């Protein structure tokens, strides 16, 4: 998520020491408590939302609202939950775009010069 290298991290540590000085342990403790409170608030809000939706949404997952997850779930998943395309699994070794057995063997489909 954050792309911070070793040199950049050292600069941030030196900058924190200059700005906060001997109060750095207190500031770090306050930051830790604040992050813990935010996490507890988020978990509480999530639990309240799931409780308020009722029993028909007992298997509802907040992560399903992420656009990537939503699209993947509703467009690419089969009823069994396995990603498929044209009846073959997307992660199979054989191509999923082949429509005839001859195409899997490397044969080219027939081509008609007069049709084009």
Image: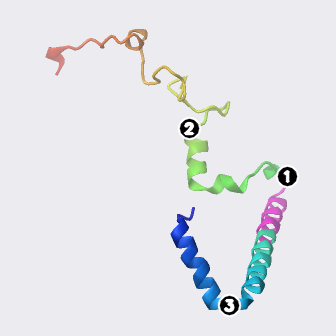
Question: Which of the image's four quarters has the N terminus?
Answer: bottom right
Q: Residues within 10 Å of mark 1 (few under 14, many from 20)?
A: few
Question: Which of the image's four quarters has the C terminus?
Answer: top left
Task: Nearest to the eye among marks 1 and 3: give it.
Answer: 3
Q: Is residue 73 above or below residue 4?
A: above
Residue 25 appears left or right of 87: right
Residue 48: x percent and y percent? Answer: 83, 65
Q: Which residue is mark 2?
A: 76
Q: Secondary structure at mark 1?
A: helix
Q: Is residue 57 above or below residue 32?
A: above
Of the residues under marks 2 and 3, which one precedes in the sequence? 3
**Mark 1 touches mark 3? (CB < 8 Å):** no
Residue 113: x percent and y percent? Answer: 15, 15
Residue 21's tag is 3
Which region of the structure is painted magenta?
41-54
Residue at 66% in and 52% down: 64
Q: Secondary structure at mark 2?
A: helix
């Amino acid at each position: 998520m954050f792309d911070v290298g070793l040199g950049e991290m050292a600069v941030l540590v030196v900058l924190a020491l200059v700005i906060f000085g001997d109060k750095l342990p207190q500031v770090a403790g306050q930051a830790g408590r604040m992050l813990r409170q935010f996490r507890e608030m988020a978990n509480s809000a999530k639990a309240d939302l799931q409780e308020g939706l009722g029993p028909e949404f007992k298997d509802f997952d907040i992560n399903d609202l992420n656009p990537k997850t939503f699209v993947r779930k509703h467009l690419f998943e089969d009823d069994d939950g396995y990603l498929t395309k044209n009846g073959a699994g997307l992660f199979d070794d054989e191509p999923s775009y082949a429509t005839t057995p001859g195409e899997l063997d490397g044969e080219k489909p027939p081509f008609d010069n007069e049709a084009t």
